[in-house]
């Protein structure tokens, strides 16, 4: 809910309703529950499909700062497509001249720790995880990287970025 406050005039008599909207409600919104959203899962190749898996997100926007969490759990009818994975953001990122980096955790046979990256002016984020058990360099998450995906696999991403508006 937070937005830029209005400009006040010297000597202005401000009604209580305006004070509540401009100050109280703004302050309270920073302590409110996060807003749920449903991210869209895409790839650079053949499209994946959730099937009976789950994909959920939630975020809080304070001014132009966005705090976000995405949780993906594959199901027995999930199909993984091909190519590099991306997940939609709740709001577009700013064209700030730098990429934003967040945390990504992938859990299946092993727990893989990596990052998610949000590029300038982006509407998606992408998980980057170790390429394999013997190659610790990070790379895009794919149906076979860092390990071949199967039902019950989980991806959790948490990140902070600047929004475009």
Image (spheres, rainbow, N blue to C red):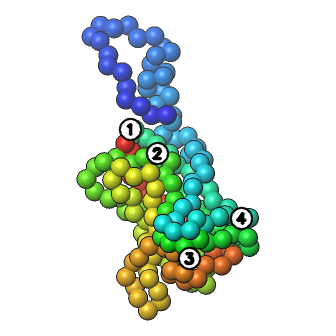
Q: CA distance from mark 3 to mark 1?
A: 34 Å
Q: Secondary structure at mark 4?
A: loop
- What mark, if any, has residue 114 been given in the picture? none
- Disc 2: which residue: 91
| Left or right relative to 97: residue 43 | right
Q: Locate residue 14, reporting x and y percent.
A: 41, 11
Q: Are marks 4 and 3 in contact (CB under 8 Å)?
A: no
Q: Secondary structure at mark 2?
A: loop
| Left or right relative to 146: residue 7 | left
Q: Are marks 4 and 2 in contact (CB under 8 Å)?
A: no
Q: Are marks 1 and 2 in contact (CB under 8 Å)?
A: yes
Residue visible at 57% across and 54% down in the picture: 39
Quick check: can you spot residue 162?
no
Instruction: Note whether 17 is above or below 66 in the view shown.
Output: above
Q: Secondary structure at mark 1?
A: loop
- Disc 3: which residue: 143
Which numbered disc flags the more N-terminal residue, 3 or 1? 3
Instruction: Note whether 67 is above or below 61 in the view shown.
Output: below
- Disc 4: which residue: 51
Q: Secondary structure at mark 3?
A: loop
């Amino acid at each position: 809910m937070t937005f830029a406050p209005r400009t006040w005039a010297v000597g202005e008599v401000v009604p209580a309703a305006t004070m509540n909207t401009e100050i109280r409600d703004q302050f309270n919104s920073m302590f409110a529950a996060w807003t749920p959203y449903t991210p869209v899962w895409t790839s650079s190749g053949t499209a994946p499909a959730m099937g009976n898996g789950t994909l959920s997100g939630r975020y809080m926007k304070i001014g132009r700062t966005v705090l976000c969490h995405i949780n993906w759990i594959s199901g027995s009818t999930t199909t993984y497509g091909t190519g590099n994975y991306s997940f939609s953001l709740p709001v577009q990122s700013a064209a700030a001249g730098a990429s934003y980096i967040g945390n990504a955790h992938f859990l299946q046979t092993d727990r893989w720790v990596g990052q998610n990256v949000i590029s300038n002016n982006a509407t998606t984020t992408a998980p980057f995880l170790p390429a394999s058990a013997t190659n610790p360099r990070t790379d895009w998450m794919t149906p076979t990287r860092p390990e071949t995906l199967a039902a019950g696999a989980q991806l959790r991403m948490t990140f902070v970025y600047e929004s475009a508006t």
